[in-house]
Image: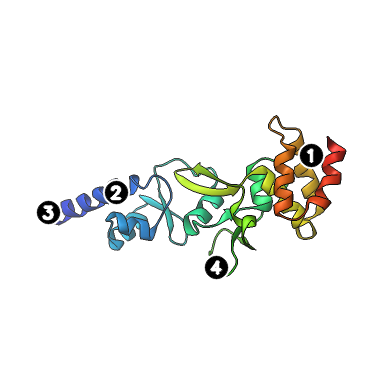
Amino acid sequence: MKKELGKKYSVCDRAIELIRQLDGAFRTAEAIKAGVHPQTLYTLLHSGIIERLSRGVYKLADTEQVSQPDLVIVATRIPQAVICLISALAFHEMTSQIPHEVSFAIAKGAETPRIDFPPISVHRFSGEALTAGVQKHEIDGVTVRIFCPEKTIADCFKFRNKIGMDIALEALKLYKARKGFNSSELIKFARICRVEKVMLPYLEAMI
């Protein structure tokens, strides 16, 4: 009995070491690929050593709380997703809105993701609208793809009828007050999003 117990603990200890190397939130598939047996994952979960963040996404219980759990879960489950619109505004601190869902862009034709938590809003982009202005941010050991502030503002003007023109204008005003304000970058992304004629009068009025 003691031998079996010792073996069980050694397997779990080894699994914990492997999971720590994943550095942050991880998917079931990533843990298995690293060498952790599915049954060992089940044991670690039910013993409270790992915590479930969302379906198929976990973290070690003794690590710090995830600072941006919703973004981390989406990035872990859907690595190709690019955080956009109000979710990106909130990350860049360019809105007074509190996102009630995670908005992200994926390629047109890509399979629609299914996540039980958090609530999501999926947007289909193509060409430069999807690839331009993408930044990679490391959040709790997970790489999260987020549109840069200028691209996010252009997207908000493009989707103004959906999210509200007031949100787009607030974002533009808050961005204008920053040290790194760059009108050339704003215009560049406005052209990519085909909203230059819409945004320019508001931008000129603020300069």
The residue singled out by tag 1 in the image is: 173
Which residue in the protein does label 2 denote? 18
> Disc 1 marks which amino acid?
Lys
Q: What's the image's color scheme?
A: rainbow
Judge from the rendering whether residue 62 lies leftward or rightward of residue 110; answer left or right.
left
Depth check: give the residue in front, 199 or 167. 199
Residue sitting nearer the eye, 147 or 138: 147
**Label 2 – label 3 distance at C-alpha:** 23 Å
**Nearest to N terminus: mark 1 or mark 2:** 2
Query: In this orientation, which residue lies closer to the viewer: 104 or 115?
Result: 104
**Looking at the image, which residue sits at the far top?**
179
Specify few, some or many for label 4: CA neighbours under 10 Å numbering under 14, 14-19, or 20 or more.
few
Which of these two is toward me, 127 or 32?
127
- How far is mark 1 from mark 2, CA to CA? 46 Å
Considering only order in the chain, which callout, 1 or 3, is on the residue closer to the N terminus? 3
Q: CA distance from mark 3 to mark 1?
A: 67 Å
Residue 1 appears at what percent x and percent y? 13, 57
Question: Is there a contact, CB below 8 Å, between mark 1 and mark 2?
Answer: no
Residue 58 appears in the figure: yes
Of the residues under marks 2 and 3, which one precedes in the sequence?
A: 3
What amino acid type is highlighted by mark number 4?
A: Ala
